[in-house]
Amino acid sequence: MEKVRVNIKRKEGCKDLPLPRYMSEGASGVDLYAAVETEFILEPSQIKAIPTGIFIEVPVGYEAQVRARSGLALKNGLAVVNAPGTIDSDYRGEVCVILCNLGKEPFKIQRGMRIAQMVFQPVVRAELKEVEEVQKTGRNEGGFGHTGV
């Protein structure tokens, strides 16, 4: 398994929160923790950027992807709105998670709660070249369920 070093810094006042970590040997992502000052209620249909209290330094050639935690998604309807949220290698601001409550009940977010996961991935940059035509395929313009249910 390939490993990549990611430097991490805690925000002032967030030393009480755990650093992101893998929760099992086979986990693909590290858990991110809510760095809210006080308990916060995310109402149904509400969207809010939740701070994590960390800054990361993703190496060039990689990105960090912020994704929902499956248990919170299934049981409470919590979704990462821009899933996966991309953290580029040149971003140095605080990592925040844009959460939406798709459930029917208000959801309580407490300091230190695991709210999302972050996966590190290599990035490939495309060289875009303008052409007069693109090659035809058997599928061509078919999409959005064109092959049936």
Image: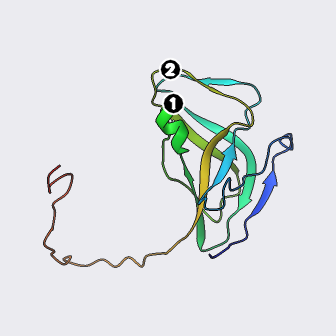
**Where is mark 1, residue-wise?**
76
Q: Secondary structure at mark 1?
A: helix
**Quarter of the image containing the N terminus?**
bottom right
For image coordinates 46% across by 27% down, the residue present is: 103
**Disc assigned to residue 61:** none
For image coordinates 67% across by 73% down, the residue present is: 3
Q: Nearer the viewer, residue 136 or 26?
A: 26
Q: Nearer the viewer, residue 60 or 40?
A: 40
Given contact means CB atoms under 8 Å apart, are the residues at marks 2 and 1 in contact? yes
Tell me the crowding category of disc 2: few under 14, some 14 to 19, or many 20 or more residues within 10 angstroms, Cα based: few
125 up-or-down from 54: above or below: below
Residue most extreme to the front: 25
**Where is mark 2, residue-wise?**
105
- The image shows residue 143 at horizontal and vertical percentages of 20, 57
Residue type, numbered disc 2 = Glu
Left or right: 87 in relation to 38: left
Residue type, numbered disc 1 = Asn
57 up-or-down from 2: above or below: above
Q: Nearer the viewer, residue 126 or 35?
A: 35
4 up-or-down from 76: above or below: below
